[in-house]
Amino acid sequence: INMAAKALHIFTSGIESFTDDLKNKTEIQLKKSDLTEAGEYTEPAPAFANVIYNPEENEEINLIMQGVGLLSKLVIKATNLVINQIKAQGMQVHLTGKNIEVKGVVQAKEIIIEASENDTLLDIGVPDEVNNLIEIDKSLSVSTMDVLTSSQIVIGKDASLQADGNVTLNASGSQKNNIVPSIINVKIGNVKIDILGSITAGGAVTASATSEFDAKADNKHLAEYFVPLAISVVVAESKVNVGEDAVITANGDIKLSSRSDVNLKTISTVGSIPISLALSVIVNDAHVEVLGTLISKSGNVTMEAEGNTTVITKSSKTASQTSENAVNPQDPSSSTPTGIGSIANQFGGFFAVAVVLQDVDAALK
């Protein structure tokens, strides 16, 4: 209703549901002290507003919203979220974190739960002088020694998600940055959605687990310093699991999907000794497993698992550090070849080994 008291009516046809993704909305900040002992927030949420609840450390959230306006949203974000109860009928509920566990009832117009993690620990701009010297991108993101990413959504056995519209569960993990130094790169990722309780949706139910790995190891800057090897190891798993006692009921579609993508490059070149070893090891798994009950009243049930692995493993005799006129790095004034120039680069041991194990399945048991 506008200032002239004119009402705007919107009529739609063929649209299954609406998702509130409006920008620049009014924000209302809440914390535990703003609630009653029973966890109620007694002020009605205005229309076109985001109510942002800021949980305390290790808080198990109990929250009851009293009265909501048009397109109001409840947003809760923390690294680790534990939900005992949320009642926010008429609102979209959006939960975001790294590990999210729901123990009790969540009631809303629409429920979105997103868990994610990546391996970026440092993100800096790179000066031109450094970029020209070591040939890296203008923006440098590194993971130093961060080899593990993990994200998880757990809908507990006593939990119940109840939405008038859609229920969306997304878990993702990303590892795309090199370890420093980059001659050895180890990346381990685990992304999982466990549905052990019940989900009831007036619209569709979607659960998606996704892993993305883009890793590289090479010895091009260390070959002349007697480091003749490059090693990459990636272990990736994405899984959606519906437990034996779980029940998913939707008026629309039910879609369960898991995908794990790995791109790996390992390059080793001869340096100050006539040997080069490149080793790549990849374990890449994507699973969808359903032991419980799936009920779609007027839609389709889809289960998808996908795994993609691209590996380049190369051991070679030639590199910019081992050119025809290479000289002893310990005696730059010497014109005597060190064995890394035209003679030694033609002879030696060049070993490239790649071991790839991939397991992908979608199973209704």
Image (cartoon, rainbow, N blue to C red):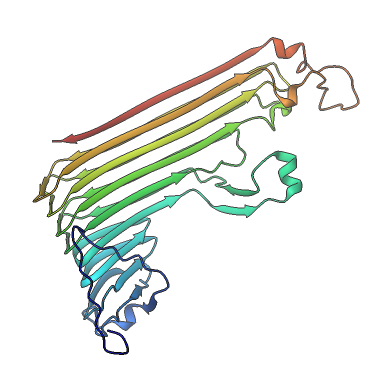
In the figure, 214 relative to 14: above or below? above
The picture quadrant where one finds residue 52 is bottom left
Q: Residue 26 vs residue 242: left or right?
A: right
Q: Is 337 rendered above or below residue 259?
A: above
Q: Residue at x 16, y 45 (%)?
A: 243
Count of marks placed on residues: 0
Q: Report the residue at 71% width, 39% height from top.
A: 134
Q: Is residue 199 above or below residue 305?
A: below
Q: Is residue 280 left or right of residue 53?
A: right
Quadrant of the snapshot with the C terminus: top left
Q: Going by the picture, which residue comes out furthest to the right?
A: 333
The residue drawn where x is 70% and y is 25% is: 226
| Quarter of the image where one finds residue 44 | bottom left
Q: Position of residue 325 (x, y in %)?
A: 82, 20
Residue 34: where, in percent of width, then height? 32, 83
Give above or below for 272 relative to 301.
above
Q: Which percent across, then down, holds residue 359?
A: 31, 29
| The N terminus: image quadrant | bottom left
Query: Where residue 187 sits in the image (x, y, percent)?
Result: 47, 39
221 on left or right of 210: right
Please identify the residue farthest to the bottom as the structure is shown: 4
Q: What is the quadrant of residue 3 in the picture?
A: bottom left
